[in-house]
Image: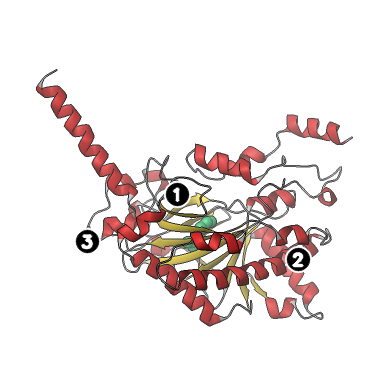
């Protein structure tokens, strides 16, 4: 006992104080003009961006382009559907142009997202909660409750369903946030429905499920990646796949998003006026593995902070997602278990995000496959 004990307690208290500082987020941390990345954010060597190679040396990738104007034109639709199918099979990613969301609205949305993170900490802290089911949630890293190493990212998550009833929960500051985010959410939803119709068409499964998507889940995530003094030691987001059906991503002009392509990390070139769209776990499951929910991650840099806005769309939260019966056959057996959103949320709140774990938990082993097959017979 005695002095040693007192010193020990003091040390623990100090460590806790430091830990709680990181919970306030990266922006808060950066307000003091730091010149080094704190240990809390330093990834083990093997997980760092380029394992020693300069991030700038990474290849850039021009994603396959889906022109919505052509998709809407009867004479061109079939050809665009073919491009869409190839993109979802080979990359799991594509970009849409002529998407019809007003450029001014897009700029206003990006601007209000950026201004939210410029608010004083006292304003943002009101929305910080570890409850993954809250209609509005501000936080840092991926899952700050369980992450042992933190990622260089702050986020604001807005539940967008049912829009009218969640709206009063959204931040009232900046003043224009609710209005712009509501308009953007509505436009993002219509575009999603148009893309889902094309996806179902491209899979040849009919569009009978479309009305279910109209009632589907919709989450808007504003990601903020402040400038980082030592960007090679950390990441904005770890390699992950998105859980939903499709994610529609709006990124500013700063590079950062990387996609895994043939085992290599390639940087997605930001294209003005386009949206990046990717296949999520639910679509991989629904397509019985034909369309790929691909790993992606985010690099940070020392020059410019970056903002992105991801809209995650899927079926209603209580709806089971299963491989489409039309895509299961003798030669193409069922590859995934049924899953629902609740299973994903439980997974998220219970463990540290690593690679493609969630989807892996939904994959059928040979043993399972045989059992399911016998259930179907
Ligand atoms: O910031 C980005 O470019 C990607 C964000 C992302 O992958 C996500 O929010 O799931
Ligand atoms: Fe993502």
In the structure shown, which secondary structural element does the residue marked by tag 2 occupy? helix
Residue at mark 1: C-beta within 8 A of ligand 1: no
Badge 2: few (under 14), some or many (20 or more) residues near its Cα, within 10 Å?
some
Q: Earlier in the sequence, mark 1 or mark 2?
A: 1
Q: Position of residue 296 (x, y in %)?
A: 53, 55
* Spatial CA span between label 3 and label 2: 48 Å
Task: Kindly check if marks 3 and 2 are in contact, taking CB atoms under 8 A apart as contact.
Answer: no
Furthest toward the left, the residue is: 3
The quarter of the picture where residue 176 lies is bottom left
Q: Position of residue 7 (x, y in %)?
A: 14, 28
15 with respect to 277 (left or right)? left
Residue 269 seen in this snapshot: no
Q: Position of residue 136 (x, y in %)?
A: 48, 56
Give the percent coordinates (x, y) of residue 151. 39, 51
Q: Residue at x 34, y 48 (%)?
A: 23
At horizontal 77% and vertical 61% (from top left) the residue drawn is 211
Q: Gap in Å between the C-alphas at discs 3 and 1?
A: 23 Å
For label 3, the residue is 33
Question: Which one is earlier in the sequence, the residue at label 3 or at label 2?
Answer: 3
Q: How many numbered tags mark residues here?
A: 3
The residue that label 1 is drawn on is 142
| Mark 1 neighbour density, 10 Å: few (under 14) some (14–19) many (20 or more) | many
| Residue at the disc numbered 2 | 197
Cβ atoms under marks 1 and 2 closer than 8 Å? no
């Amino acid at each position: 006992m005695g002095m040693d004990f007192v010193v020990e307690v003091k040390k623990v208290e100090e460590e806790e104080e430091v830990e709680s500082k990181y919970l306030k987020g990266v922006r808060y941390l950066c307000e003091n003009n730091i010149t080094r990345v704190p240990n809390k954010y330093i990834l083990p060597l093997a997980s760092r961006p380029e394992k020693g190679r300069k991030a700038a040396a990474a290849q850039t990738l021009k994603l396959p382009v889906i022109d919505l104007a052509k998709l809407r034109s009867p004479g061109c639709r079939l050809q665009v559907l073919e491009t869409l199918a190839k993109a979802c099979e080979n990359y799991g990613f594509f970009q849409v142009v002529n998407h019809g969301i007003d450029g001014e609205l897009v700029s206003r949305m990006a601007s209000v997202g950026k201004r939210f993170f410029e608010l004083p900490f006292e304003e943002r802290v009101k929305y910080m909660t570890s409850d993954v089911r809250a209609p509005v949630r501000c936080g840092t890293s991926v899952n700050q409750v369980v992450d042992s190493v933190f990622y260089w990212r702050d986020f604001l998550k807005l539940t967008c369903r049912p829009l009218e009833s969640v709206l009063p929960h959204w931040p009232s500051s900046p003043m224009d946030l609710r209005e712009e985010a509501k308009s953007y959410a509505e436009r993002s939803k219509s575009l999603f429905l148009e893309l889902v119709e094309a996806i179902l068409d491209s899979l040849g499964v009919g569009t009978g499920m479309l009305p279910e998507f109209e009632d589907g889940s919709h989450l808007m995530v504003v990601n903020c990646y402040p400038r980082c003094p030592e960007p090679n030691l950390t990441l904005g987001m770890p390699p992950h796949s998105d859980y939903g059906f499709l994610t529609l991503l709006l990124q500013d002009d700063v590079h950062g998003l990387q996609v895994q392509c043939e085992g290599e990390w390639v940087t997605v070139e930001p294209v003005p006026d386009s949206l990046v769209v990717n296949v999520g776990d639910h679509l991989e499951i629904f397509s019985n593995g034909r369309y790929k929910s691909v790993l992606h991650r985010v690099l940070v840099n020392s020059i410019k902070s970056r903002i992105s806005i991801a809209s995650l769309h899927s079926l209603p939260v209580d709806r089971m997602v299963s491989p489409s019966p039309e895509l299961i056959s003798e030669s193409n057996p069922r590859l995934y278990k049924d899953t629902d959103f609740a299973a994903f949320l439980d997974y998220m709140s219970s463990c540290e995000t690593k690679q493609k774990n969630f989807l892996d938990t939904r994959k059928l082993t040979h043993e399972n496959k045989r059992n399911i097959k016998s259930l179907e017979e």
